[in-house]
Structures are given as C-alpha cells and as structure tokens.
Amino acid sequence: MSGTITKVSGPLVVASGLADANVSDVVRVGSQRLIGEILQMKGDSASIQVYEETSGLGPGAAVETTGTPLSVELGPGLLTNIYDGIQRPLTEIRDATGDTIARGVEVPSLNRKKVWDFTASAKAGDTVRPGDVLGTVQETTAILHKIMVPPGVSGVVRSISGGKYTVDEAVAVVRDEKGNEHQVTMMQKWPVRVARPYKHKYMPNRPMNSGQRVIDTLFPIAKGGTAAVPGPFGSGKTVVQHQLAKWSDVDIVVYIGCGERGNEMTDVLMEFPELKDPRSGESLMQRTVLIANTSDMPVAAREASIYTGITIAEYFRDMGYDVAVLADSTSRWAEALREMSGRLEEMPGEEGYPAYLASRLAQYYERAGVVECLGTDSRQGSITAIGAVSPPGGDTSEPVSQSTMRIVKVFWGLDSSLAYARHFPAINWLTSYSLYVDTLKDWYDQKFPGFMDLRDKALAILQEEESLNEIVKLVGRDSLSAADQMTLETAKMLREDFLQQNAFMDEDAYSSYDKQFRLLRLILRYDELCRQAMDKGASLEELFVIPARERVGRAKMILPGQYEAEYDQIEQDMKSEIQKLSAGGEDR
C-alpha cells in the first residue's frame, strides 16, 4: 500500500492515503526508500518518524508501507558485529557504499551468505514447544549459540539434520496439531517494541561482579537488576560503562552508544577487539554486540536503538545466558523523544519532555530481570540493564534523572568534584545507593562471611568523615580527639587505597570479590589495631607512619595470585609494629 507525502518537518514526515496502515508499521519513504516508522494515524494520514536524513524530500513523494512493525533479525552472526540504531550492519554498509553511509541502503542485518555449522540436538519424532533447543552453532569461541523453536510454533519434529546452513535455510520442519508444517530456520524476527515471552520472573539474588570496588562492595547490582549512572560532563560515565562492559561476569554484553560523541564509540571499537576476556582469554568482542547511534547520526534512530539493544539481549537471555545491556545514554534517547514529540505538536510535560517519558523509561527497564526461559529444560537467563544519564549541568533534579531514579534500584551518582580531584570512579558514596543489598546479603554471607559487616562499617566511617570535615573547617584538625583523627585517617585510606581505582593499569583495573574482601578487611584491621594501641597510650603520629601503613596503600596494586600471601604478611607485620608502639605507650 502506498501514499503521498504532504508535509516534511525534519525527521517527521506526514503522508496521506495510508488508511489501511497501522501504528508502528515500517514504511519506505521517497525515491531513496528511506526507512521510517508510523507514530500516529489520523484518518488516512500517517505521521512518520524517518530514521535517516530527510533533506531533499518534499510533498508529493511516495510512501510505501511494509505492513510489518520495526523488527530485528535474531540468529548466528549477531556477536562481534556493530549495528546502527535500526540494526543495519555498519561494517557491511561501509564495504558496500564506502565510509559515508548512503541513504536508503538496504543490507540484511544477518549475513545471508555466511555458512554456519549446525549441530542438531533434537531428532525426528520429538515433540517440541516454543523455546526448546533444536541444535547449536558455535558462533564464537566464547559463546555457543542455541537454535530454539520460535514463539508460536509447537508440534512434532518431522525432520531435522545437522550440517552447514545459512541463516535463512531450514534446519528443521515442525508439524503442528492442525497438520501445518513450519520451516524452522536459524534466524528469527521479532518486533523491537514487544518484550519476548518467558515462563516466570524471579527476584534477582546473585551479584554481578564488575571488578570495581566502589560498586561491588558498597553499591552492588544483582544480575537481572537495573542501575543508573548519572553525572555531569567529564565525570567518567563513559569510562564506568566501558569498565562494566570489559569486566562484568556476564556471558553477553550489548553496548548501546545512543547519542553520545562519536569519538567515544571509536574508543570502544579500538579497545574491545584488543582486550582479553578474563574468563576465556579471547577477544572481548567474541561476546559483545555493539549498537552505534552517535550524536552525528539521525536523531530519530536513537529512539529505536534502545529497543533494538534490549530485544537482542532478550534473545540471548532466552538461551539461558546472563546479559548486560549498557545504554550510553538514556538522556540522549529522551532528547530524541522530546524532539519528535514537539514536531508532533503533543502537549509538552516538564522541561519540554513528553508526558509519557516516565512510562517509556519504565517499559525499557522492565524488560530486565531474571527469568525462567521458555522450553522444557528449565534454563534461567538474566538481563541487567544499566543506563547512563547525562543531566544538563549535572542537575539530577531534571525529569530524565528523576524518572529513572523512581524505576531503577541502583544509583551510582557521579560527582564532578571527585572527578576534578582525579578520584575515579567518581561515584559519590554519600549520594549513591543500592536496594539490592538485602537480597544479596545471603550470597555474600555464604561466599565471604563478614563481608557485609565490613561494608557497613566502611560506609559508617565515610559518613562520619563528612560530619567531622565540617568541624575541621571551623576549628582545625588538631582540635579533634584522637579517636576522631583516627576516623579521618581510616576514611582517607578507604577513599585512596580502596575506592580509588585506575582503569588504565592492568594491576588495578579489576578486583575480584576475594581481593576486595581481603583489602577492605586489611584497612579496617589497621583501624581496629590502632584504636587498641591508642587506648594503651600509643601516639597517633607514630601509628600513622609505621611501614605497614605505606604497604597497605600499595596493596591494591598486587597482582592476582600474589595478593593472598602478601596481604596476610602485611597484616602480621602491621600487628607486630603496632604492638611495639602499644608496649612503648604503656611504658610511658
């Protein structure tokens, strides 16, 4: 069915003669067949957001509807790939058109020519239902891709055979109860705005190890949880996202560069192929899908990129994998919503954002979670959704930050003052929080008894430091009691020797739970021993300059495999040195 353009306003195109079209249908606009999506229908008039540059379009040009919603192709070939916001493979587009993307280019999302080695696990005569695994493809050295029965298909496997296939060739035939036969290929299509089905959703109860001490120890996130990383320009949002993508103990990473600067996405493209996955030793790209819709790319496609990413994540979740979706940033996505809403002449909400901003954010974050997947094998998968927020001027009272904070359960608030002081990650321990602490406590208590007690004690010291600093500003540090001065020294150690972390040094970029636990215990043990020595008359000046104190400051740089014995030795030496000072204090 085709219509005619009556109005063009930037990425918004209005066309008449589309009475039989539906909202969310994908359309082709103009002679260049630009990709668009219908947002509104009024009679036979359709308001369309076009995902490509519309310069040169004018009234009278043809609009053709495809009759299908915006969908993604799911199958072998997703990993290691980089897509734009509507799942067009940028590498293949560059090969076809050069470094500048031509408008209206039509390239399939999954390579139709590449042959994959399919290993059948089901056999003829098996009864299958949606989600059952028919076979596998070793997509990368890190990930085994499971070929599943698509939703809506069930019955008896009439034929299936292993071998070499392209993604659009049938690997199995399933006959349903009505006698209809369904050709099952290795590729599925799924509309991006519809969540993929599952059996049951569970409360997240396992932490996601990010390797970042301030996150894993103070403000942990659960696998299947939601988190926001708000912060002003230059506070390190993108680096935090990169660290999470590099080190998180998930199976798959979907990184969405939504509206941020192109050079940041370039850093990802340059770094990730060279980085080694700490679990497999292979390139990090072997388990990564990148979606790039940077600030110099069409605004409307930002709105689609978030849904494209979460739908790809749901597909891998359905295989039983743990997936992390990193969106950088949802503020740019919200700005795209605001622009399209303004062009549609909708009633604006706060600061010009559409009234439905909060509900759209909720629809995105609600697709995270731990689920029991479809199928008979009762596998579980999870999606952890982490979104960066870029509030103008760092003002988290603006609508995107506030709407996000009402939805997510972890808030890692970045602080410009910490960033300017070169304290990274610049996550403010006074404003950040995690609502997963209680649900994760059993896991921590089982794996690392005493970890949560140390965490609570460290947070209390850091909060007390803030109060003491106000007194120091008025009357000076020397007027404080010895106990309060000890609190300030311990807080300084927590900040500099534990929370501060260098993403560009191999020794310090990643910390395991065990290393974090031992290092935190070492610092708080120093505090405990010093307070005992002070009670026996030891002087603060001597306690602060013992050799073991300096070794604690360098302890975080000790490599894995060496820190265990070294930390034990530091603790023994620390105890010995402080006991000598305690004895000297008693003599005095």
Image (tube, rainbow, N blue to C red):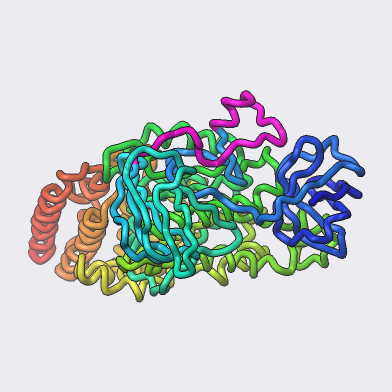
Residue at 58% in and 68% down: 362
Residue 110 seen from this side: yes
Q: Nearer the viewer, residue 150 or 74?
A: 150
Q: Residue 97 magenta-drawn? A: yes
Q: Nearer the viewer, residue 101 or 376?
A: 376
Q: Is residue 420 above or below residue 371?
A: above
Residue 126 picture location, percent across and down: 31, 62
* Drawn side of residue 475 relative to residue 438, left or right: right
Q: Nearer the viewer, residue 177 or 65?
A: 177
Residue at 67% in and 63% down: 398
Q: Is residue 499 above or below residue 420?
A: below
Residue at 60% in and 47% down: 258
Residue 219 seen from this side: no
Q: How many marks?
A: 0
Residue at the front extreme?
179
Residue at 8% in and 64% down: 587
Q: Is residue 151 above or below residue 297?
A: below
Q: Is residue 141 above or below residue 513?
A: above
| Screen quadrant of the C terminus | bottom left
* Drawn side of residue 483 relative to residue 179, left or right: left
Residue 16 picture location, percent across and down: 88, 54
Q: Magenta segment range?
A: 91-117
Residue 74 picture location, percent across and down: 49, 49
Residue 167 picture location, percent across and down: 46, 42
Q: Nearer the viewer, residue 131 or 384?
A: 131
Q: Which quadrant of the figure has residue 106?
A: top right
* Drawn side of residue 200 relative to residue 43, left or right: left
Q: Residue 460 magenta-drawn? A: no
Main structural element of the magenta stretch: helix, strand or loop? loop
